[in-house]
Image (cartoon, rainbow, N blue to C red):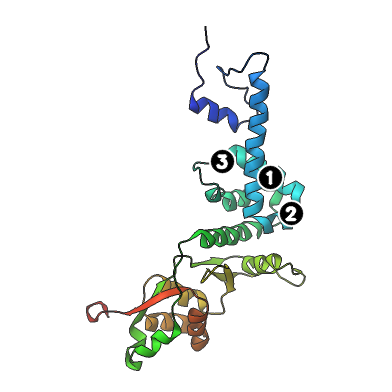
Amino acid sequence: MRPDPVSSGAFAEALFAPDLPSPEGLTGREETRPQRRFSVYRNNVTVSLVDALASIFATVQNLVGEDFFRAMARLYVAAHPPTSPLLFTYGESFPAFLESFPPAADLPFLADVARVERLWLDAYHAADAAPLDPAALAQIPAEELVNIRFRPQPATRMSRMRHAAGTICRLDRAGMSLEGVNPLLPEAVLVTRPAFDVSIEILPPGGALFFERLLSGHALGDACLAAGEEAADIPALIGLALASGAFAAIDLVQESERP
């Protein structure tokens, strides 16, 4: 009599829990040992997921070393099995895992570095869209410029970080030394992909407020007022909004929507 087939739930649970025995009901061809084959398969799956994390969070791995990273990633894989067949979506909770991982407590900036790398990957896989042509602003009457609204590129991401994670990622990805970088300085990052290459911009003072307003659909005038509270260089921020490729189009806020 053939044994009962293995349920998919039991198979998945055992696959990502190395301390569990092979699930009941495994069968193999004659002269084979299904439990041993399952152990090999389980290890191969774990290795492939660890490899994926190492690719996504390459700067994190460079900061802690390959051996430390792979040991840490194995623990993450065991605690957080994938929920999607799309491998590039894996590891979305990895930054939070790093924050609560005691052996990494001496590197408090590590989680923010992972967040920037996750933003980079999300921008890379976002839908394509042509960047805004700066000449489009020339078509707007000068008195109406404060009422224009910027439509973001699908790839654009912005986040405030408690640490210098954007600077660390930029330098590491460029193969440059991190000497002289104070990782404990907070910064805001703008991640864009106007064409094929993802770009990480470190926003100047007032930049976080400025881009938060624009990305949430506020008019340019509102964004400038918000950034002005932090003594921002408004012309430079407008120039960055255009040069970064963070936006795809502009339109005018309707009269009925204006304060």
Give the spatial CA distance, label 3 vs label 1.
12 Å
Q: Earlier in the sequence, mark 1 or mark 2?
A: 2
Give the spatial CA distance, label 2 vs label 3.
21 Å
Identify the residue position indicated by label 3 in the image.
Answer: 80
Q: How many residues crowd around disc 2 within 10 Å: few (fewer than 14), some, or many (20 or more)?
A: some
Locate residue 83, reporting x and y percent: 50, 41
Three-letter code, disc 1: Met
Q: Residue furthest bottom?
A: 142
Locate residue 46, reporting x and y percent: 64, 38
Q: Please give the name of the residue rendered at 45% of the width and 84% of the height, measured from the top-left corner.
A: 134
Q: Earlier in the sequence, mark 2 or mark 3?
A: 2
Q: Please give the name of the residue rendered at 58% of the width and 19% of the height, measured from the top-left corner.
A: 26
Q: Report whether 254 appears left or right of 178.
A: left
Q: Residue furthest left?
A: 256
Locate residue 231, reporting x and y percent: 52, 85
Q: Is residue 258 visible?
A: yes
Three-letter code, disc 3: His
Three-letter code, disc 2: Val
Q: Secondary structure at mark 2?
A: helix
Q: Report whether 255 appears left or right of 201.
A: left
Q: Please give the name of the residue rendered at 54% of the width and 41% of the height, measured from the top-left corner.
A: 82
Locate residue 159, reporting x and y percent: 52, 66
Q: Earlier in the sequence, mark 3 or mark 1?
A: 1
Image label count: 3
Identify the residue position indicated by label 2 in the image.
Answer: 64
Identify the residue position indicated by label 1 in the image.
Answer: 72
Q: Is label 3 in contact with label 1 (beta carbons under 8 Å)?
A: no
